[in-house]
Image (cartoon, coloured by chain):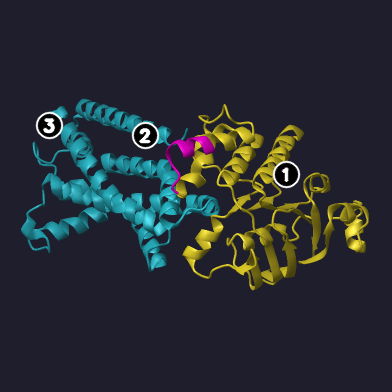
Chain colours: A cyan, B yellow
Amino acid sequence: MAGDPLAIAGLSLLVSATSTLLSACIAVPLGVALGLREVGSQRLLRNLVFTLYGLPPVLAGLLVFLLLSRDGPLGSLRLLYTPLGMVLAQVVVVAPIMLGITMSVVATVERRVKETALVLGADRRQLSMTVLREAYAGIVTAVMVGFGRAISEVGAVFIVGGHIEGNTQVLTTTIITDIRQAEYAHAMLIGVILLVIAATVYSFLYRLQERAMP
Amino acid sequence: MTMALTLEGLRKTFGDRAVLRGVDLHVEPGAVFALLGPSGVGKTTLLRCVDFLLPADAGTVLFGGRRAPPDAPGQLGLRRRIGMVAQNPYLFRGTVAYNVSFGLCVRGVEGEELERRTAEAMRLVGLEDRGGAPAGKLSAGEAQRVAFARAIVVRPELLLLDEFTANLDPANVRILETAVREFQRTTGATVLLVTHNLFQARRLAARAGLLLDGVIVETGEAKAFFEDPKDARTRAFVQGDFAY
């Protein structure tokens, strides 16, 4: 059997939660600004975001691998085959998805809310805050989708993490290697743990979302 | 506080369709004026131009005899003296009280005054017991009453009502019309009511006018407008002979 399931689950959760948090820190403010049309060259940025939506994780993994490899621009950071390198790879995959959803949610909400807030006397700052408040549930959805993508991601973390036992083993890569080695029972166990983690995290995020929709 | 509203040669075109073709209209301060017209004639467009939601292509809007300031802060200051209720209002996520108090909050009203004025506005539309109810769970009639309460809670000098009781049941219509009378009586505000409902216009307005083909056809005292109109088109409209 390859690796302690709990340790693998712990690392998976840590890597995915960190990449989700980092992606949210980048994608949510940018998505709100783009959705509110406050950033210049927005059409170009939007096209770029939607292109990155379809970025295959293995390609993202390859790009991050080349960036972090010994001869790459960020090689001196020595992040290849480390959990932090896996976090970076997941951010490249997850952030565009969160950005795109946040942008769309804010843009859609804004059309309905903006006029009402303006008519009621809101200034520019109050208008932005009102739009954000109305978009809260959608932004939580963006985070949920991002986490789902991160925890289930396999291609990029395999390439950048290398699946080193006791160091960069995560749930999804473990399932792949278990199948290769015909360790089906262990693969199933890891799969169940993956589902339990996803259910627990989604249950928490659902509660956050419900609070926004009285 | 109240303000006169004057439109001079107001024009608005969407693509190749001229909706407003030079509207001239004067509403005296403290009056309730009903602007009538068939659906799709440009009544809502006119209100949106008055409340800065749409830029007019040409013409002038005077508030209390003065042009609107061209800058955003100036327009915000003026807009905060105007209230508007749409036909299908959007209610924010949150409670009834949150929605009703929104205009006060953005104006910096807080504490006891915020609570008192919010409660007064909810009482005016019969929602004094519904302050904690989620806005998303209201009936159409209750939602429209919330929209009216949040428009008048800030005591606007000019109140714009855009088909504000369309599709509501008679009980809700009566509550809202009573609220309009009470609000107007206690504040002396100017009210511009846009409607295609002749009965409502007769019940509420002291003066009335007909908008047709992008221009004002006729205005006058309500009694004369409805009972002895000068223009043949107005006569056809008030007698229900106008097909639209």
Q: Give residue B152's position: percent from left, percent from top.
A: 60, 45
- Report helix, strand or loop for mark 2: helix
**Residues packed near mark 1 inside 10 Å, few (<14), some (14 to 19) or many (20 plus):** some
Label 1 resides on the chain identified as B
Q: Give residue B172's position: percent from left, percent from top.
A: 71, 35
* Quadrant in which residue A137 is drawn: top left
Q: Which residue is mark 1?
A: B166
- Can you tell which mark lies on residue B5? none
Q: Which residue is mark 2?
A: A208
Q: Which residues are magenta?
A: B108-117
For residue B115: magenta? yes
Give left or right: position of A25 versus B62: left
| 3D distance between C-alphas at marks 1 and 3 | 69 Å
Tell if the residue under mark 1 belongs to the same chain as the one under mark 2: no
Give left or right: position of A91 versus A123: left
Q: Give residue A130's position: percent from left, percent from top.
A: 44, 48
Number of the front mark, 3 or 2: 2
Q: Which residue is mark 3?
A: A2
Label 3 resides on the chain identified as A
Give left or right: position of A163 versus B66: left
Q: Nearer the viewer, residue B237 or B174?
A: B174
**Residues packed near mark 2 inside 10 Å, few (<14), some (14 to 19) or many (20 plus):** some
Our reading of the magenta stretch's main secondary structure is helix
Report the quarter where the C terminus of chain B lies. Answer: bottom right
| Residue A180 seen | no
* Quadrant in which residue B9 is drawn: bottom right
Please name the amino acid that badge 2 sits on. Leu
Please name the amino acid that badge 3 sits on. Ala
